[in-house]
């Protein structure tokens, strides 16, 4: 006796004193609708490899995690849109107040996308600095009357 409860044979000797036992067949029938709901066919459930149910459960967990991530991301986009539009909804907003522009690109979700986005920002900053220095050089050359080829 491992669990402390009476076995099926011991319970039958004592009459109705033991708790009703649930058979494996009843357990399988109880679980059957769940597996149908997650896409398993009746043939796979009843006649297929018993290990298959583990993989269907794992696939369902992955689908749920993915769906949760998608809904969270959708909520973030809605939140950002509301925050962008909020200046014009303020009761005491000054006349001519405009909403902030909505994001021009989606969120970077993968490390590769994040790295690419970071590199693009760094390139933009570098390009802006280069344009500033070229404008400064042009104004300095104009001030002293030299050309860029003479310097």
Image (cartoon, grey):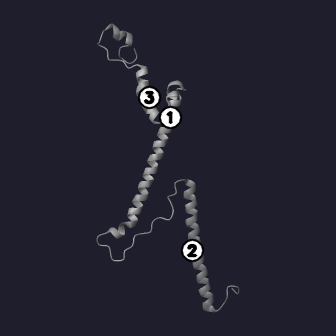
Q: Is residue 77 or residue 140 the one in the foreground?
A: 77
Task: Find disc 2 in the rendering and name its residue.
Answer: 128
Label at residue 32: 3
- Residue that lies at the very extreme toward the bottom in this rendered image: 145
Q: Is residue 106 left or right of residue 16?
A: right
Which quarter of the figure has residue 142? bottom right
Query: Tag 3: Cα neighbours inside 10 Å, few (<14), some, or many (≥20)?
Result: some
Q: Is residue 79 or residue 28 the one in the foreground?
A: 28
Mark before the other along the chain sequence, 2 or 1: 1
Task: Find disc 1 in the rendering and name its residue.
Answer: 56
Single out the mark in the foreground, 3 or 2: 3
From the top left corner, tell me how far across and down residue 24 is, in percent.
43, 20
- The answer to whether marks 3 and 2 mark residues whose Cβ atoms lie closer than 8 Å is no
Examine the rendered structure and indicate whether residue 94 appears above or below residue 46: below
Examine the rendered structure and indicate whether residue 118 appears above or below residue 145: above
Q: Is residue 140 left or right of residue 79?
A: right
Separation of marks 2 and 1 at Cα, in angstroms: 53 Å
From the top left corner, tell me how far across and down residue 104 is, in percent.
50, 65
From the top left corner, tell me how far across and down residue 9 is, in percent.
38, 10
Label 2: element kind: helix
Q: Is residue 21 or residue 33 the one in the foreground?
A: 33
Residue at image coords 58%, 63%: 119
Label at residue 118: none
Mark before the other along the chain sequence, 1 or 3: 3
Residue at image coords 50%, 31%: 41
- Residue that lies at the very extreme toward the top in this rendered image: 13
Label 1: element kind: helix
Separation of marks 3 and 2 at Cα, in angstroms: 63 Å
Mark before the other along the chain sequence, 3 or 2: 3
Query: Tag 2: Cα neighbours inside 10 Å, few (<14), some, or many (≥20)?
Result: few
From the top left corner, tell me how far across and down residue 111 is, in percent.
55, 54
């Amino acid at each position: 006796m491992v669990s402390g409860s009476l076995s099926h044979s011991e319970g039958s000797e004592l009459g109705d004193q033991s708790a009703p036992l649930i058979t494996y067949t009843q357990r399988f029938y109880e679980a059957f609708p769940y597996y149908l709901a997650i896409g398993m066919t009746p043939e796979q459930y009843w006649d297929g490899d018993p290990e298959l149910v583990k993989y269907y459960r794992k696939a369902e967990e992955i689908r749920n995690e993915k769906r949760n991530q998608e809904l969270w991301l959708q909520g973030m986009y809605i939140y950002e849109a509301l925050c962008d539009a909020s200046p014009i909804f303020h009761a005491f907003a000054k006349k001519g107040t405009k909403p902030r522009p909505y994001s021009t690109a989606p969120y970077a979700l993968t490390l590769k996308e994040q790295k690419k986005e970071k590199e693009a920002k760094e390139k933009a900053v570098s390009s802006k600095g280069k344009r500033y220095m070229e404008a400064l050089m042009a104004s300095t050359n104009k001030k002293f009357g030299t050309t860029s080829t003479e310097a």
